[in-house]
Image (cartoon, coloured by chain):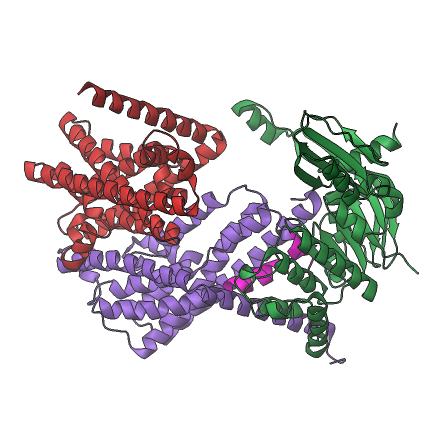
Chain colours: A purple, B red, C green
Amino acid sequence: MRSTPPFIRRLSDGAGAAGAAYRAGLAAALAQTPVLLGRAVFYGVCLMVLITFWDKVAAHRLPGTLAARLPAGGLGTYVGVTEWVTLSVPAVHFKLEDDIRAGALEPHLLRPKSYLAQTLAGQAGFMTARLVMLGAAGLLLLALFARTWPSVPTMGAVFTLGVTGAAIGLLLLTLVGLTAFWLRRVLPPMLIVQKLAFLLGGLFAPIAFYPGWLYRLAWFSPFGAHLAFAGAAIIGPPSWTGFATMLALQSFWLAALTALAVLVWRAGLRKTLREGV
Amino acid sequence: MAPALDDLRALVTAYAAQALAAIRQSFADRTNFALQVGAMAVNNGFWLVLWFLFFAGFKEVGGWRLPDVARLLGIVYVLFGASGVFFGGYRDLAGSILTGAIDALLTQPKPILLRLLARDSIPSAWGDIATGLVILAFSAGLDPAAAGLSLAAILIGTAAWLATTTIFASLAFWAAGARSLSRDLADFTLLVSTYPASIYSGWTKFVAFTVLPAGFVAMAPVELVRAPSWQAAAIAVGGAGAYAAVALGVWTLGLARYRRGAAVAG
Amino acid sequence: MNPAVRLKELRKTYRFAKARRGLLGSLAGLLHPQFTHLEAVGGVSFEIAAGERVAIIGPNGAGKSTTLKMLCGVLEPSGGEASVLGFTPWKERRRLAYEIGVVFGQRSQLWTELPVRDSFALLRRVYDQPEDAFARRQGDLVERFGVGALLDQPVNRLSLGQRMRCEIVAALLHAPKLLFLDEPTIGLDVTAKAAIRDFIREQSQAEGQTVLLTSHDTRDIELVCERVIVINAGRIVLDEPTEQLRRYIARKLVTLQSAAPQLALDLPGVTRRPSEPHTTILEIDTRATRVDAVIARALALGGIEDVTVEDPPMEEVVHEIYAALHP
């Protein structure tokens, strides 16, 4: 133990604390089973409306429209995936707003571990519970709506891209929450980010249906990495290179958004330490 | 006849006084008010953009085209906004029941439900009214007949919407956990309401006309504007009336239960 | 031996952008902001020895919490020096954090949905405590604070008094040298308050922890702390052993409702405050006369309908101390 370099020890201590926060977040989510079930019901209602909608579109394939490009089974499984990711991301922005605005930051600042890291780890635990719960509900709902389940390799790709996409969503909402250092309410930036995620992430329809320029914008934006990749994987199982490209792009956004969150957090913390809450 | 008329006048006056106070209260923080109204307008505009993109690619869904959806959204936004501005208490009616806010009102002579609905006014609802009116002006034009029908649809839809949310909130008389449930049910109904009526059939249509009665909040009133007929009018008015009757019945039953409970507890 | 806390001429000045009227005014404010300065703390100096239990009190907005924030490292001062357990708090916040334990009476540090034990396990990782030593320490504290039966219950099912005992154990788990308590008895009933005070005092005596406490309850100060620092308008107005302040703190207000419009009650150390007929408000110096003696005498008079016993509000106590110092 004595011979471990201090840097390595600090890193492993930090990981240990984050791991403990992750487990606590997961346990807290599981302790509120009715809330999780309520989330699953909400997921079910969203799917009911959207699947009904896309089935209607697919039922009358109007010539000369995009309907010709609809996948054989319609977009039921597609919205199943994008809604799964969207509804799994916890409302970390409201937690950050509460802590930052109500002065609840102080008890955390009096601890030796980073508040941001501990909070993100706890919320990731929370998100894990939702991903599992809604994932199971999704498979059940697809069976209910008489959809065939995707093949195992496709499910693997969707799972990987979906979980990474959810992590990107968590970071996007974290950035929204950190604006609370400067704004009184985070709701306005949240609405903007949410709507951008719906549009550029392709929550309701694949971004491949968009006009070329909008498609490219969506593909290279963090919102595409958040939702559209997992959705794309379920309509047309990706090639290995396609899968690797999407995962690489997701990794880039994961790193970039993490770095940005750390920078914004540090700026906000400096402001708080100087000016008080 | 005259005493009944006096009662009605007293009722309306009491409601108007309370609603006016709530609206003025919602204006108090002007920055917050402007921000909420603006955010809601942007939010609604975004949905319109999404629909625009959809129809650019797909032309129609079950016979509905962009103008039909625009009319639907216009009517739903206005009726939703009007409910929020003039009857904003509906949003947390279950909370009012659960936190004992009705105790004080029980000691006063005026009907409780109307007072509770009027005691809050939601600032962002003005954003709904504004976007809804702009959409209606563009999609229906300024044709007086269309405007009259739209107004009728909005009034009928508002009644159905308030009746529906009152039924959901009344669950709180029976179950303590109904606060978030009633809000969720209202949100689900709204979600179903904002899609073209033509997509629902079979069991989804059954859901939309029963548990989550978007059918009477949006579909039937909008159909009255889309294809006016005596039959369409009868369905819209009858549906809203039936739900209003059920709402009043459930509310009265719940209140009676509450009073018994309060009497035992006291 | 070095003092645990040493502040020298610590100052904090806040700067606010002046709000201007109207739309044009607020636009101008964005372009050319004008600032007002508010001195929250204007040169505070004191030392606290290791193992001392000190109350820091003062009316709301007096600069008390600003001082404490600077002392913990969550606020940077505008000037002056501070050393807490050998660290400069705002420069070495993380390292200082390992050495201090914090209890906020109005804010739970435990996960509300989880069993108490789970929050403790999380804190072990947050403070990098070795497992076996931690388990021993947790066992000791759990026994001393009598929370063994609570460990497996979710925090949201505990009573406020039970929760507060767990909060204090949580703050002590990493063996801090300095314990910082902000309103530790707020909202508790009389019995729970008494228990918490005993626990804190005994804990500090057993392990030699330095305790810094703020409270609006004079009994917290009287029963836990040996020394009181009073801050008002950003400055220290008094720094005395608690013993010296007993004449301000050791007081009770007894309110009697009686059938008779007036009560004749004359006892040493009891003064009468102005009141309505049928109500008698007595201020008792408990060093001279005990509360039960006053009540017994009142009951002996007959016709007493109601009795309330209260502590004088902290604002009033501070005001009196201040007035006594600046006649």
Q: In the displayed orientation, state which residue is furthest to the right.
A: C1
Residue A269 to residue A164: above or below: above
Please provide the residue range marked out in magenta. Answer: A106-124
Query: Which of the image's four quarters has the N terminus of chain B?
Result: top left
Residue C318 to residue C1: above or below: above
Q: Residue at x 68, y 39 (%)?
A: C308
On the image, the x and y values in percent for residue C217 come to 73, 45
Q: Residue at x 79, y 62 (%)?
A: C202
Q: Residue at x 21, y 62 (%)?
A: A70
Q: Quadrant of the rendered structure where residue C300 is?
A: top right
Residue C167 to residue B41: above or below: below
On the image, the x and y values in percent for residue A78 come to 29, 64
Residue C264 to residue A141: above or below: above
Q: Is residue C233 visible?
A: no
Q: In the displayed orientation, state which residue is furthest to the left.
A: B230
Q: Residue at x 59, y 62 (%)?
A: A117
Query: Which of the image's four quarters has the C terminus of chain B?
Result: top left
Q: Is residue C167 left or right of residue B166?
A: right
Q: Is residue A223 left or right of residue B207?
A: right
On the image, the x and y values in percent for residue B192 come to 25, 50
Q: Quadrant of the rendered structure where residue C211 is?
A: bottom right
On the image, the x and y values in percent for residue A249 come to 45, 65
